[in-house]
Amino acid sequence: MRRYGKHTDEDDIRTRPNRKGNRPRTSIRPKHEDAAEGMVLTVDRGRLTCLVEDRIVIAMKARELGRKAAVVGDRVALVGDLSGKKDTLARIVRIEERTSVLRRTADDDDPYERVVVANADQLAIVTALADPEPRPRLIDRCLVAAYDGGLEPLLVMTKSDLAPPDKMLELYGALDIPYVVTSRDELENGDAADRVREHLDGRITAFVGHSGVGKTTLVNALVPEDRRRTTGRVNAVTGRGRHTTTSALALPLTSTDGWAIDTPGVRSFGLAHIDPSRVIHAFPDLEPGTEGCPRACSHDEPDCALDAWVEEGHADPARLYSLRRLLATRERRDGD
């Protein structure tokens, strides 16, 4: 240990830096007013692929953003090397306010919510009519997430050559959801893509669906020049599809002014983050009837005012049934 006598040289003494003296800090951060605007196309292990004007730029999140993460569809502000040349890296310094958010949790007991897509206008829920069998509970959960996040739903039913769509149309008819019915042949020859494309013009559409339902095949047909993903088969034993899409990816639709966002196949869609009281906003014909409901009404109890509202002829009873089915979906397991 070094010891000092009575007569020490000040320059010899080591002093510890302190926040107020040696290393002054400031909470003022640069505003980056000259930052370029971009859109996040995909995220891979901390590297974000962004579209800046007509260039593809690889970027990373700035430290000043803290734990806030950018996701596919986010509008961001970037600084640094925006040339898009090989081995260059830009920096995302700001994430703009989102107009919509598609979120999910791993299950209904998981408090950690995951943002899947930001700023999408529409959620295309892709389900097969057979092989694998449709899972209405999973569709219901996707619908709840869409209504809660501010996305309009679109139901795409595939493999109509294996089973008719009548049962599904009856189940979701009261929700007035736009829908498209396709067959395997139509997916292969492009007819299915043409009919789905009519619903995508001028919109950013996120595609979700259970593995094996033909979601990525459909996206490949919509954007044939970007067929970077492979498709998988349904397991004959379990009836489940194999995950072939591992990360969300935004692709521009060349024949129409819009975007398609392909997302990984899901086997569960947790709704732990959803406030059930917000689901009623997706039913404007029923919402006025809730004025007479008791406080914190679940809309599925004996004194709920919606029963009288429907009996008086203000709304279709099938709509109330659909609302209650969606509200109850958190209480059921996906495999029910």
Image (tube, grey):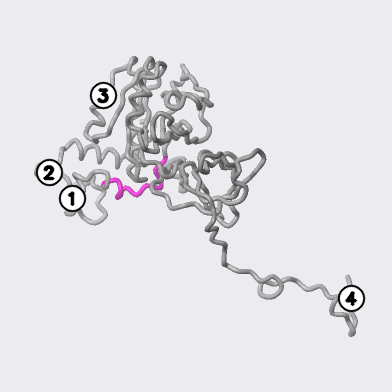
Badge 4 is on which residue? Answer: 3
Q: CA distance from mark 4 to mark 3?
A: 88 Å
Q: CA distance from mark 4 to mark 1?
A: 81 Å
Q: CA distance from mark 1 to mark 3?
A: 30 Å
Badge 2 is on which residue? Answer: 314
Q: Secondary structure at mark 1?
A: helix
Quadrant where the C terminus lies?
A: top left
Q: Which residues are magenta?
A: 270-280
Quarter of image, res 181? top left
Q: Secondary structure at mark 2?
A: loop
- Whether residue 274 is in magenta: the answer is yes
The answer to whether marks 1 and 2 mark residues whose Cβ atoms lie closer than 8 Å is yes
Q: Which mark is residue 167?
A: 3
Amino acid type of disc 4?
Arg
The answer to whether marks 4 and 1 mark residues whose Cβ atoms lie closer than 8 Å is no
Dot placed on the residue nearer the N-terminal end, 1 or 3: 3
**From this viewpoint, is residue 46 visible?**
no
Badge 1 is on which residue? Answer: 288
Amino acid type of disc 2?
His
Tell us which disc is closer to us: 1 or 3.
1
